[in-house]
Image (cartoon, grey):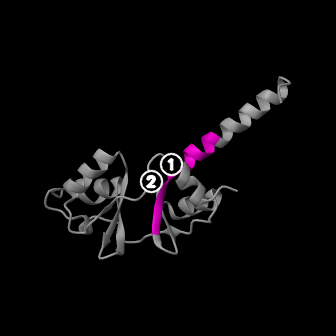
C-alpha cells in the first residue's frame, strides 16, 4: 500500500509553496506560473488560512471581473482546507478528492505541513503502477520472468 508519504517522496518537487493572505492575486498567479504549480497554501503567522488554486482565479476573480492586481489572495482563496496524514493510502486520498470534488490535499503530520498532493500526482502514480504491471505481464507472457 502506497502512502501519502511515499507519494510525496516520489514527486520531483518537494515542499509546499505558501503565500500570505494579503498578496495580490496577480503576484500569486506569477508565482504559480514560475513554479509550474496549480495551487498555493495560504498561511499567516504559522497558521493555515486556506488554499489558492487556478480554479479560484477563474471562478472568483476573472469570472467576477475583478482586477487581479488589486484583489488579494484572501478575497479569492478557498478557506476550507482538507488535510490528510502522511500514512493515508493513495487510494483513500483519491476517494477523498472524488467525494469532496477537490484537486489538492495538504499532507500534515506531527510537525505541521509536509507536502501537498494533487490529482495529477495521483494520476501519475496510477500510470506508474499500470506501467509496472504491463512490464511484469509482458515478461511473464514472453517467458522472461
Number of marks in the image? 2
Q: Is residue 63 visible?
A: no
Residue 114 placement, left or right of 19 = right
- The residue under label 2 is 14
Task: Kindly indicate the quadrant of the structure image that contains residue 145.
Answer: top right
Q: Secondary structure at mark 2?
A: loop
Residue 77 shows in this picture: yes
Residue 117 magenta-drawn?
yes
Q: Give left or right: position of 109 versus 95.
A: left
Estimate the x, y position of residue 128 in percent, counting from the top left.
Answer: 62, 40
Taking the magenta stretch, the answer to whether it contains residue 4 is: no
Q: Secondary structure at mark 1?
A: loop
**Residue 129, percent from left and from top:** 66, 43
Contact (CB < 8 A) between labels 1 and 2?
A: yes
The dominant secondary structure in magenta is: helix
Task: Give the alpha-carbon distance from disc 1 to disc 2, as whole Å.
Answer: 7 Å
Q: Quadrant of residue 75?
A: bottom left
Farthest residue, direction top = 142
Q: Say which mark, if any, is on residue 75.
A: none
Q: Residues within 10 Å of mark 1 (few under 14, many from 20)?
A: few
Query: Which residues make up the magenta segment?
Result: 113-128
Q: Of 128 and 55, which appears nearest the observer? A: 128
Name which residue lies at 27% across and 51% down.
31
Q: Residue at x 29, y 55 (%)?
A: 57
Q: Position of residue 103 (x, y in %)?
A: 47, 56
Other residues around mark 2 within 10 Å, as few (<14) / some (14–19) / many (≥20): few
At horizontal 27% and vertical 64% (from top left) the residue drawn is: 76
Quadrant location of the N terminus in the rendered image: bottom right
* Residue 24, quarter of the rendered image: bottom left
| Circle 1 residue | 11
3 is higher (above) or lower (below) than 110: above
Amino acid at each position: 500500500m502506497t502512502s501519502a508519504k511515499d507519494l510525496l517522496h516520489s514527486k520531483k518537487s518537494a515542499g509546499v509553496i505558501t503565500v500570505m493572505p494579503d498578496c495580490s492575486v496577480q503576484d500569486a498567479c506569477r508565482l504559480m506560473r514560475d513554479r509550474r504549480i496549480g495551487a498555493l497554501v495560504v498561511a499567516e503567522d504559522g497558521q493555515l488560512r486556506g488554499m489558492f488554486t487556478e480554479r479560484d482565479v477563474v471562478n472568483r476573480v476573472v469570472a467576477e471581473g475583478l482586477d487581479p492586481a488589486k484583489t488579494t489572495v484572501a478575497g479569492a482563496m478557498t478557506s476550507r482546507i482538507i488535510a490528510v496524514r502522511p500514512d493515508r493510502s493513495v487510494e483513500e486520498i483519491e476517494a477523498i478528492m472524488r467525494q469532496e470534488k477537490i484537486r489538492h490535499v495538504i499532507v500534515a503530520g506531527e510537525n505541521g505541513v509536509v507536502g501537498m498532493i494533487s490529482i495529477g500526482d495521483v494520476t501519475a502514480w496510477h500510470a506508474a503502477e499500470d506501467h509496472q504491471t504491463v512490464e511484469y505481464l509482458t515478461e511473464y507472457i514472453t517467458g522472461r520472468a
